[in-house]
Image (tube, grey):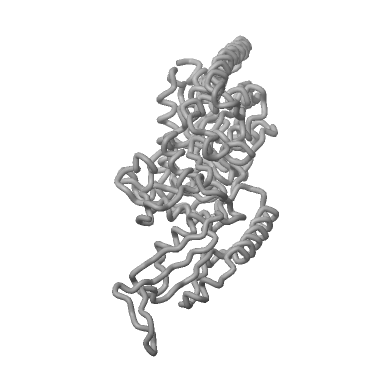
Amino acid sequence: MGTLRQTQIPPSELPRYGAERLSGIRCIATQFEPGSPSDAILTTMALQRLDVLAVLALTGTGFTRRGGGATGYIQSTYLAHLVPHPEQRWLVSAPIDLDDLAQQDFLALAEGLEAEFSHAFTALQVEDERDRVLVVGLFTNNQTPEHFEQRLEELERLVDSAGGEVMETMFQKRPRPHPQTVLGAGKVQEVALAAQTVGANLIVFDRDLSPMQVRNLEDMVGLRVVDRTELILDIFAQRAKSGAGKLQVELAQLEYQMPRLKGRGQSLSRQGGGIGTRGPGETKLETERRAIQRRIQRLQQEVNQLQAHRARLRHRRQDDNLPSIAVVGYTNAGKSTLVNTLTNSEVYAADQLFATLDPTTRRLAITDPATNDTTQLVVTDTVGFIEELPASLMDAFRATLEEVTEADALLHVVDVSHPAWQDQIHWVMRILKDMPIVPGPMLLVFNKADRVSSEELAIAQEEYPQALFISATERLGLETLRSRLLQLIDYAVTV
């Protein structure tokens, strides 16, 4: 008894819940309005995955049946239930007589529906084993429409890089995030209903969520909820190949998990594979916090040792009088492709976010065409930067980022074909500014110049007249780049 909001049972507390089954609850509802049940009532039915919903439309004062006879208050009845159809969420009957409603075999109806849902769910799983993701954004007052749209597009690419498939993208415009659920209560219901409709098994938000917000959303939606930082950490967990990279990723994940231990495993399991579940795993809740804290301390010691080891390697290169250049830039700007092209090496490169995680150092020999003197230097390909790089990653990857601060000079690669290349330059420079040691001189290089029009190139040239414009894949402008690298190194070692 009560309003729709008061009587709604959280998905985690239903007797049964899942895309392939109904909840095991049949509900009778009443309404004074004539006609079929409203969308609000049907939405509640869908969110709770009720077996069936019987709606009794009442009259306020009773009525007389045709031909006379007894009076009553039930004017008409309706029977509603879910259907496993991508374009139709539910089915509502025409008005039926109360006696006909009472003769319905609800158990057989529910079992038949559940069999159909099970078949549809199995076909969905066989068709694609990847996570089926519903992306959710919050458009606040401190964002421009262009920046918000680009941020959502970047989140979709992050989901793709993590191995998920974006089924649908939703957003809400609010002055500020709701402290309990980020979105408003009505929008959370829309998200839950959309997730059921598209068959999503994961919700990804475009911002960092507090542990309380994650728990509240998971209780209301009935699916795993992952924020932007956890998504990036998952990508790093997949990309780390070296022992050092895996070490740093695990440290970042554990530091992220520490404040989120309470409540995990009580409502929804975080195990079983998929985005947000890869990495160090879980232990029992009562011992988990102490175990993770001890593990973090050991990992921090190992990262310190890793720093010392890389420092010795850098000193060895300095003893060999080899100047060093660190290649930095926003993720997917083409850094690894450029290093491969310059050094004729095979650093892994792909058209995806964070394709390269572990830093790779290669030798590069450049011959001065005027004097025929050959200069030997080392080029280090570093992890790509991103807007609002998680603080846990900045801390855990300090050994990797020292390759940037210890380099003699920086080569900042920018994807000029990206519509938000100005913002990407801003975020890279902001991260570099937060480094404990100010990096050396920097050369700005606009990559993928073959993918933009001459008008777009002119805008970038006017804003950055000292920058170079190249194409690493088409090998355009590389000779000029080599000459400028010689000038950059000469300036760096003499200053």
350 or 119: nearer the eye?
A: 119
Number of numbered tags placed on the structure image: 0
Q: Is residue 403 left or right of residue 71?
A: right
Residue 180 in sight from this viewpoint: yes
The residue positioned 49% from the left and 59% from the top of the image is: 46
Decide: is 114 above or below 171: below
The residue positioned 56% from the left and 52% from the top of the image is: 200
Q: Is residue 245 left or right of residue 206?
A: right
Decide: is 178 above or below 299: below
Q: Quadrant of the C terminus?
A: top left
81 or 117: nearer the eye?
A: 81
The residue positioned 43% from the left and 18% from the top of the image is: 436
323 or 170: nearer the eye?
A: 170
Residue 367 in sight from this viewpoint: no
Residue 63 drawn at (x, y percent): 33, 80
The residue positioned 43% from the left and 20% from the top of the image is: 438
Residue 354 drawn at (x, y percent): 57, 37
75 or 459: nearer the eye?
A: 75
Q: Quadrant of the N terminus?
A: bottom left
> Dividing the picture into quarters, in which one does residue 304 lie?
top right
